[in-house]
Image (cartoon, rainbow, N blue to C red):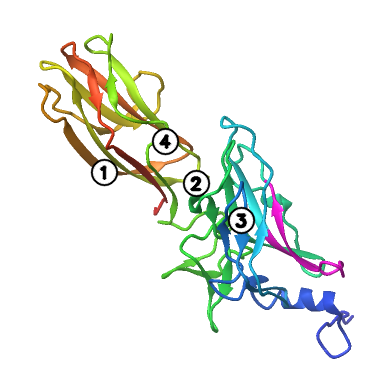
Amino acid sequence: MAVIHTTVGFKGSTNQIGEAKRLAKLGPRATVADAAAWKVSHAAGDRTVTVAAGSGQACGVDDTTVAVDTIGPFPPNGTASTATRWDMVVARWKWTDPVTPVEFVHIAGVPGAAGPDLTKLVRNPGTQMDMVIGVVRVAGGQGALSANDIFDPRVWAGTAGPLQASPGAYLAAIDGRDGERLDVGNVAYRYSSGWKYAPGQLIGLYDGVPGWTGSGTFGGGVAVGDSLGIYTFNTPDPGQPYEARITLAVEAGSAAAGTRWDFFLGRGNSGNAMPATQDMPFLFVAEDDGRPRYKHQISRRIQGLTGPASWRLVAKRIYGTGDGVVAGNKLFSVEIIAATS
């Protein structure tokens, strides 16, 4: 018995819904026109972004905007103690909505989740297609966003070639198919639905010393052999294995001759306890007799990391009774990089 063929594509045999389903099988289902089109950037105001002018297509339906669009403010994310929330900005095509068939939409995430809630996306050709054009990290109590809070999941088609993505691509939100070639900057990959960031990609840069202000003395009453927590800096869970490049520069010593403080930078523990993992031990020469304190700088790349991290600088009194001193010209930065192996 011959099977029945249902054919769409010949003249008179299709409509816009049938065309969308047909074109979705021919190549990438949703793309922007180029690297500049519909790029999401942070903007002035609380939790607000802009979407650059440009064009994109979903299943053969092309849409063009000729002006910058502003989206926000996003809903607030609790207080400073609230866990990070990952939001999305999507371009949405709706075949059944004659009033707003294409629009930019904000989708809020769930505080404490490892990434945006991709289950809220609808990717059904001929009905609704959501293409994520921006992933936005909203910290607890956050007001204005920064460039470090915006992640780019857009892809565009190369000329007779593979999909293209920026080196900052947030790969989990791309509407790709396993095995599909994806060029991220100058590196070619085979797309995997398990990706979040491309290997070696800079996920986040955390610099400055928030909460570590001014200069001054410390350590009064700390006994020989005991420790004192000087500074703690937290980085969120990027949702996949990663590496961290840590740079610390600090001018420190003791306020009295015959006193020595050793400094340690590491992960884990809290309060005045020594870090559980001493990633970057310091041995400051701290017998200070009023001369300038000693400035130390070290940088190290730490591999094999997962989950959130708490980076801690701890001072330990080795001998003597003088206070420790930390000057104001200090630097602390953490680069979070997607694991390369």
Q: Are marks 2 and 3 in contact (CB under 8 Å)?
A: no
* Residue assigned mark 4: 210
Whole-number angstrom distance, CA of label 1 to CA of label 4: 19 Å
Disc 3 residue type (three-letter): Val
**Rendering coords of residue 36 (x, y %):** 55, 71
Disc 4 residue type (three-letter): Pro
Q: Is residue 254 left or right of residue 76?
A: left
Whole-number angstrom distance, CA of label 2 to CA of label 4: 25 Å
Secondary structure of the residue carrying numbered label 1: strand
Is residue 137 visible to us here? yes
Up/down of 255 relative to 37, above or below: above
Q: Closer to us: mark 2 or mark 3?
A: 3
* Residue assigned mark 1: 299
Q: Are marks 1 and 3 in contact (CB under 8 Å)?
A: no
The quadrant in which residue 150 appears is: bottom right
* Residue assigned mark 2: 240
Is 263 part of what is drawn in magenta?
Answer: no
Q: Is residue 202 left or right of residue 75?
A: left
Up/down of 162 relative to 214, above or below: below
**Rendering coords of residue 18 (x, y %):** 83, 77
Quarter occupied by the N terminus: bottom right
Which badge, 2 or 3, comes first in the chain's sequence? Answer: 3
